[in-house]
Image (cartoon, rainbow, N blue to C red):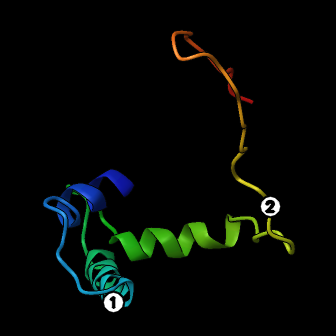
Amino acid sequence: MIGYFRRNHFTPVPEVGSLAELNELVDQWDLHDGHRRIGSRPRTVDEYFAVEQPLLMPLPEEPFETGVGVHMNVPTRVRVKRDSC
C-alpha cells in the first residue's frame, strides 16, 4: 500500500505552500484510496483494514528512539563502513 500511495500521489512531488497543506492533501488521498478495490478482490481497502485493525498492537505509551546518531572523526582519504544495529 505504501508503494502504491507514493507512486500515485507523490510522483511527481506535489507542490504545496506548507506542511499543513500537504497533510490535508494526504488526508484527502487516504480517504479516497480507502474506497478502492485492489484488482478483483471482493472488499475495499477500508473493509480489509477494519478486519485487520483489531489485531494490531497499540502504540507504546512512551515514545522510543527510531534512529542512532553516530559521530566519527576519520581522515579524508579513508573509507568507513558502519554496521547496522
Question: Relative to residue 62, is residue 12 depicted above or below?
Answer: above
Closer to the camera, 1 or 65? 65
Residue at which label 1 appears: 24
Q: Residue 17, how many percent across, how many down?
A: 24, 86
Q: Residue at x 68, y 65 (%)?
A: 56
- How many numbered tags mark residues here? 2
Closer to the camera, 81 or 46? 81
Crowd band around label 1 with a 10 angstrom C-alpha radius: few (<14), some (14–19), many (20+): few
Crowd band around label 2 with a 10 angstrom C-alpha radius: few (<14), some (14–19), many (20+): few
**Residue type at the position of mark 1:** Glu
Q: Residue at x 49, y 70 (%)?
A: 49
Upstream in sequence: badge 1 or badge 2: 1
**Residue type at the position of mark 2:** Phe
- Left or right for 50, reference 34: right
Classify mark 2: helix, strand or loop: loop
Classify mark 1: helix, strand or loop: helix
Question: Relative to residue 41, is residue 21 depicted above or below?
Answer: below
Q: Residue at x 55, y 11 (%)?
A: 79
Q: In the picture, which quadrant includes the N terminus?
A: bottom left
Residue at which label 2 appears: 64
Spatial CA distance of label 1 from label 2 is 27 Å
Quarter-of-image position of residue 38? bottom left
